[in-house]
Structure formats: C-alpha cells, structure tokens
C-alpha cells in the first residue's frame, strides 16, 4: 500500500525508539503515509488518510489499528477529510491577526473564490484557518501542505506564491 | 526578523549567514568546549548540577522553575533507562523563540542536552518539535547527524565511557503537547492527553522511566553556564532571575522579532528595540508572557521590567517571554474572542470542566463580540471560569481562564458597553 521509499522512512522512525516501543513511531509513520498519499493522489479523496491506510500503518508497526486511528484523529495536521492538491493553512491567531493574518486569510479566500474550510471545485486548493505555528514574528504566515512555511505573506507575496503553485 | 542583543544563546551568531547553524560555525563560536571540558576533567555529575543551580537559570518554557533543582530530582544512580526530553513544542500564541534556536543555533541545544544527559546519567534523549515547523525539524536532524559524525553524540563520546544519543520527534498539531506529560504521551505514540501528577516525570516519565523535561531555551543556555561559569550567567540578569532571556515581540510594533536581553530590562527599552509602536499609535495593552498570561494595560507595562518577579508583581506572568503588543485600535472583546476560540479548539477533551468550559467561554464572548451579549454575561463568564480553573488535570483550563479574567478586569468598560449598546466602544481594526 505504501512505497518502498515510505517504508524505509518509517523504518528510520522506528529506529529512533527502544526496540519494544515501535508505537512511538506512529506519528512519524502516519505523516509519511500522508505525504505519499498527497503526492500520488489524483483526487481530494485520494490525498487524505483513510481507515485502510491507517490500518496498514498500524499493522506495519504491529500495534492495534485503533491506536493508530486515535492518533490520526487527535492531531490536527493529519488530513482525515478530502483535501486539495495545495492545502493552505493561514494562522489567524491573535499575534498574527495584529500583523495581518486575518487580512491574509480573507485575501486568499477572495482570490481563490472559496470560503475558509472549503476546497476549490477543481480540487486544487483547500483553505484553512490555523492555530499558532510558532512563527508570530514572521506574520502573516501560512503553511502549504503542512510542511512548507511561508513568511511575511503580504498581498503581493500571496499573489506570487499562488502563481507559483499554479 | 531576529535581533539579538547581549546574548547568551545567540552570542556571535550571524543569523543572516546561511551556515550559521552548522557544527563548524558553532565550534568556531566556542561550541562544544563545555562538553569537552566536562568529559576531559571527568567533572562529577553533582558539580555540573550545582553549576546550573548556581546560575539561577529558571525554566524558559513558562513556569520559571529552577532548572538545576529540577535536574537534582532525577535519581542519578537509578540503574535502568532514564531520559532527557526537550520541549520544542512551541505553540503558545506569541511565542516563537525556540524556532529561532533550531534555525540558527541548534548545536547549543544539542550540547546542552548532552551535558544534561551526562549530569543525570541518562543514555538517550528526545527533542519533541512543534508540528508546524517541519523545515526546522529536518534541519535539526541534519545537525544531529553532524554531532554524531564529530563524536559528540553516540557511543563513547570523545573517547570516554559516556554514551548518549539524541533523536528528534516531530509533533503534528496539538497545542496540548507543550504540557510536559501530554508531550510524553505523544512521544509514546498516543493521544497527547496530560497525565495526572504525581507521579512526576522524574520518577515516572517516558515509558514509565525517570525523565527530565526542559524547554529548548533552558537547555541551550547550559553550554554558556558551564563554559563561562554560573556567576557570569547570573550577572547577565538580576538576582533570582539569572541570565539573559529571549523575548518574542509580536503585534503592533515596527520590528517584531526575538530579542535576547538581560532579565530585568525595562519593558520601555524592549519596546524601543522593537522599533516602537507601528504607525506611531498609542500603546493600549500588552500580554507579557504568551497568550495564557494575564493582559496588562499599557501604562502598567511601561512601569515594569522584564523579569519573573516584576511581571508577577504587576499581576501577570513572564511565562515564555512572548510579548504581544496591542494598540488603541484593538477592541479587547474581539481580541479575547480570538484567544477563547484557540483554547476551545485546543482543549484535549479529557477533563469535563475544560472540554465544556472552553466552549462556553468562547460562546459567551463570541455573542458579546457580535452585539448579542446579555445582561449577566460577565458574571456568567466569572462563574464558568471559577468552575474550570484548578479543577482539571493540567493547566490548560487555567490558561483559558486567565485571559478572560484579566481582559474583563482591565477593560471591563468595553465589555459592558458592547453588552448594553450592541456595538463596540472601539472601532476595531486588527492592523
């Protein structure tokens, strides 16, 4: 279900923990699985985690499927719902809002024609509001697909970023 | 932007240089000298701990607990596995200092953790990194590889009989994991729900083994303390508030960023360093220690110095050193509404008073902010808060209540006006 490359990356996660504590690697393993789904999925439904993938990860680590499932649903960066090719998460928490975080989210929403929480009809973009990313000094900040942080996202910087993704 | 003045952690770090994080650059700045000296002189463990105690270093994650004292709680002679764990799960709104340590000076943290491992007789450590900073996680892993290759990490460090390895664990989006026992649960691959204390991590921590958890900035201060001496560190701050501290300044200032300054520096000086108020607007309010710290009116803040004791005397907490600055255009009801939403969103759901209470707080503040407040709503907020604070396993409930109590205390007229007139007293602008 996952590529050899993803499995090797999961093995590296497992090696970080004591031999009898493979469960510790479940967070990393689910992240690796999600990245593969995102990169290979053709539709929003194929880009998120689902029970089959979660069960596969659990079996690979030899832990109960529910143990992996509760982790996937507890941490909010694991996409459990269909998601666009580019998931854009804008921080709108107080410190960011004071430096344009809310404005940035509204600007992107207008520009893409989707409300916060929605995915564009072509399945390309999902726009989300996020909580503190620990980068308030760089506000407005946004994350593209969980892992790429973009700082100082003025309207001009947003235009440039969206053109790049396009 | 990151500006560092008189730094302990960032002394000599050129943050504009792309390679400033690398081992070679760190060694050129005097890095790993402390570790080398400890190992070559076979410094007794208790001497290392005594040095950290004497430095007056207080935990930089928010609680301000003396780091050396915490280290002394570890059963050093315990024969089984023990762990040191670093908390880089930095998600307290306003706080962004640990990310800069990972980006610009990760080896200071690595060296600090190795020294901690030596002092407490542990063989392994983990650094738990905030989910949203994946690039810093990858960079930290690269720094770990460098340290391993140079013989600072792994088996028989620098040819001694001391072995210690360190790994990075990446979170995936849960504020609660900044709470130390939730962090341990998460590190074990579970939902990040805090544990009841006692037992404390020093006796029952990661995998049930003795564990010490410190903040990134605390560990990263240790190499300086050992290399230059506890006294020098202590003198960099003020009595009972040793050292310099990283302050993350955000909000309505001209130059948001991190400032590493001596504890005890007047707030007015810090504000000036951050370029003063943006657009010359008037200072209205400051949250001096991250979103969970009580807000203080601007004029009170202008009389404070930036240290644990002064901020505490003014009725707030230095916390993580996150300074959120707000100008006269902010409607305090709107500001509080956003924070209340955050705590509601991030409550882990384990304890009923927090799970339900954070929702109620948000609901009531939201309706006040939208001109739908009812007479008695402020009393209702008090009552909900009183049924949350101190009644849960961890401090998230308290953290949600502190802002509510302080906003409604210092800016009560704005709440009352909105409830009565159904429109805000202040024509709100975020920025």
Image (cartoon, rainbow, N blue to C red):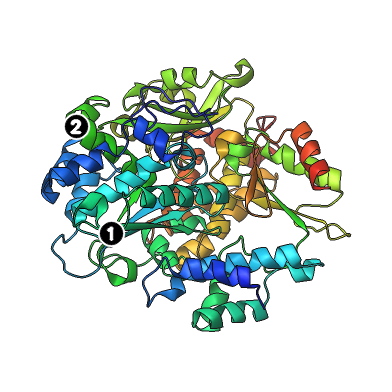
Q: Which mark is residue A6?
A: none
> What residue is shown at x 21% (from left), y 27% (from top)?
B232
Establish whether labels 1 and 2 are both on one chain.
yes
Residue B238 x/y as whole percent: 24, 26
Quarter of the C terminus of chain B within the rendering: top right
Residue B348 or residue A27, whichever sits in front: A27
Q: Quadrant of residue A105?
A: top right
Instruction: Give the image location of residue A116, x and y in percent.
Output: 76, 52
Total labels drawn: 2
Q: Earlier in the sequence, mark 1 or mark 2?
A: 1
The residue indicated by pointer 2 is B229
Q: Nearer the viewer, residue B307 or B223?
A: B223
Q: Nearer the viewer, residue A7 or B338?
A: A7
Q: Quadrant of the N terminus of chain B?
A: top right
Q: Position of residue B110 (x, y in %)?
A: 36, 47
Q: CA distance from mark 1 to mark 2?
A: 28 Å
Q: As displayed, is residue A4 above or below residue A159?
A: below
Q: Please state if B118 lies on the left or on the right of B418 as rendered.
A: left
Q: Which residue is mark 1?
A: B155
Residue located at (33% from left, 71% from top): B207
Neighbor class of circle 1 (other Cα within 10 Å; few <14, some 14-19, many 20+) is some
Mark 1 secondary-structure assignment = loop
Q: Position of residue B143 (x, y in %)?
A: 44, 47
Is B53 left or right of A39, judged from the image as shown?
left
């Amino acid at each position: 279900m996952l590529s050899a490359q993803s499995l090797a990356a999961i093995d590296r996660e497992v090696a970080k923990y004591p031999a009898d504590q493979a469960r510790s690697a479940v967070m990393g393993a689910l992240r690796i699985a999600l990245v593969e789904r995102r990169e290979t999925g053709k539709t929003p439904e194929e880009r998120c985690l689902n029970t089959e993938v979660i069960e596969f990860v659990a079996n690979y680590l030899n832990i109960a499927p529910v143990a992996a499932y509760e982790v996937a649903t507890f941490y909010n960066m694991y996409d459990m719902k269909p998601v666009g090719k580019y998931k854009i998460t804008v921080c709108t928490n107080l410190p960011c809002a004071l430096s344009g975080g809310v404005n940035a989210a509204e600007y992107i929403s207008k520009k893409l024609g989707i409300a916060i929480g929605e995915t564009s009809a072509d399945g390309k973009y999902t726009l989300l509001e996020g909580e503190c990313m620990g980068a308030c000094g760089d506000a407005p900040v946004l994350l593209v697909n969980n892992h790429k942080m973009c700082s100082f996202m003025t309207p001009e910087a947003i235009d440039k970023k969206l053109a790049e993704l396009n | 932007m990151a500006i560092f003045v008189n730094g302990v952690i960032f002394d000599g770090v050129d943050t504009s240089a792309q390679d400033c994080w690398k081992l070679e650059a760190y060694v050129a700045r005097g890095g790993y000298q402390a570790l080398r000296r400890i190992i070559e002189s076979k410094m007794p463990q208790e001497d290392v701990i005594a040095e950290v105690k004497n430095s007056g270093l207080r935990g930089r994650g928010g609680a301000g607990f003396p780091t050396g004292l915490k280290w002394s709680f570890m059963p050093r002679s315990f024969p089984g596995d023990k762990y040191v764990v670093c908390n880089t799960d930095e998600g307290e709104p306003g706080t962004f200092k640990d990310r800069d340590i990972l980006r610009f000076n990760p080896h200071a943290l690595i060296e600090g953790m190795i020294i901690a491992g030596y002092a407490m007789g542990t063989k392994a450590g983990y650094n738990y990194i905030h989910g949203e900073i994946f690039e810093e996680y990858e960079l930290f892993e690269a720094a770990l590889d460098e340290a391993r290759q140079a013989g600072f990490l792994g088996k028989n460090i620098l040819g001694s009989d001391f072995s210690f390895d360190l790994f990075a664990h990446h979170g995936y989006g849960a504020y609660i994991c900044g709470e130390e026992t939730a962090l341990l649960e998460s590190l074990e691959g579970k939902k990040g729900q805090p544990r009841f204390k006692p037992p404390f991590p020093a006796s029952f921590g990661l995998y049930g083994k003795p564990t010490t958890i410190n903040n990134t900035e605390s560990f990263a201060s240790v190499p300086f303390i050992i290399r230059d001496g506890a006294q020098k560190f202590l003198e960099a701050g003020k009595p009972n508030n040793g050292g310099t501290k990283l302050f993350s300044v955000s909000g309505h200032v001209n130059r948001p960023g991190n400032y590493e300054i001596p504890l005890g520096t007047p707030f007015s000086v810090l504000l000036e360093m951050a370029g003063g108020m943006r657009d010359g607007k008037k200072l209205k309010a400051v949250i001096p220690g991250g979103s969970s710290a009580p807000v203080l009116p601007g004029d009170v803040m202008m009389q404070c110095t930036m240290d644990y004791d002064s901020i505490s005397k003014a009725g707030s907490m230095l916390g993580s050193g996150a300074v959120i600055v707000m100008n006269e255009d902010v409607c305090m009801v709107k500001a509080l509404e956003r924070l209340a939403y955050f705590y509601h969103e991030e409550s882990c759901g384990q304890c009923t008073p927090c799970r339900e209470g954070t929702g109620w707080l948000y609901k009531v503040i939201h309706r006040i902010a939208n001109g739908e407040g009812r007479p008695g709503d402020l009393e209702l907020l008090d009552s909900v808060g009183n049924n949350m604070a101190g009644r849960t396993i961890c401090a998230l409930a308290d953290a949600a209540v502190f802002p509510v109590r302080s906003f409604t205390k210092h800016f009560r007229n704005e709440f009352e006006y909105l409830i009565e007139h159904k429109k805000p007293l202040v024509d709100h602008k975020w920025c």
